[in-house]
Amino acid sequence: MAVQEFDFASGKVLDPKRKQAILALESDADANVIKDSLRKHSYKLLGQESDLRATLDLVRKNKVGVLFLDADLPGMNVSELLPSIKKGFTELKMVVLSSSVTKEMLSDVMRLGAVGFLVKPVQDEALEKVLAKIK
């Protein structure tokens, strides 16, 4: 018999095939907003890291469905990282977050394969719109 996960908050058995997510964020406030929304949408959170190397290790191990990637992490160059992640993990959906947004950055991120972009601090409404686009 397979082990099933149970969500005590909702009182429901969780679907083992539900979407999965990893957070690569420094801000606990942003992480909490995203975690709450992921829980509402029945995502399985595989981990949260603030270190890029640890995040990539999680992605390699789990081949997750959605990666929330903070462009403001130390050592992060989104323009170089997105294509290499997309090439290695073609099924992975990426949502990029940043507090400093320019039209060029937004255009580059979407052109390089991100499915969404969130301005920090993360707002519930914007997050809901991004999650609705992810299939």
Image (spheres, rainbow, N blue to C red):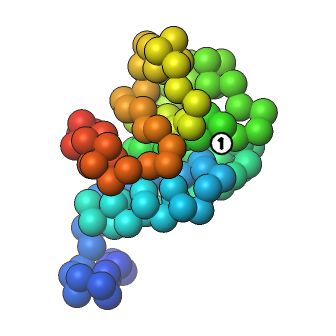
Q: Which secondary structure lies at badge 1?
A: helix
Q: Residue furthest right?
A: 75
> Foreground residue, 114 or 105?
105
At which x and y percent is residue 87?
Answer: 53, 21
User: Dot 1 corresponds to which residue?
Assistant: 56
> Foreground residue, 61 or 108?
108
Q: Classify residue 120 as left or right of residue 110.
A: right
At which x and y percent is residue 66?
Answer: 42, 44
Q: Is residue 64 visible?
A: no
What residue is drawn where x is 32% and y is 87%?
8
Residue 135, relative to residue 61: is it above or below? above
Residue 15, relative to residue 30: is it above or below? below
Q: Classify residue 55 as left or right of residue 23.
A: right
Crowd around label 1: few <14 · some 14–19 · many ≥20 (10 Å) = some
What residue is drawn where x is 73% and y is 48%?
51
**Quadrant including the C terminus:** top left
> Foreground residue, 2 or 72?
72
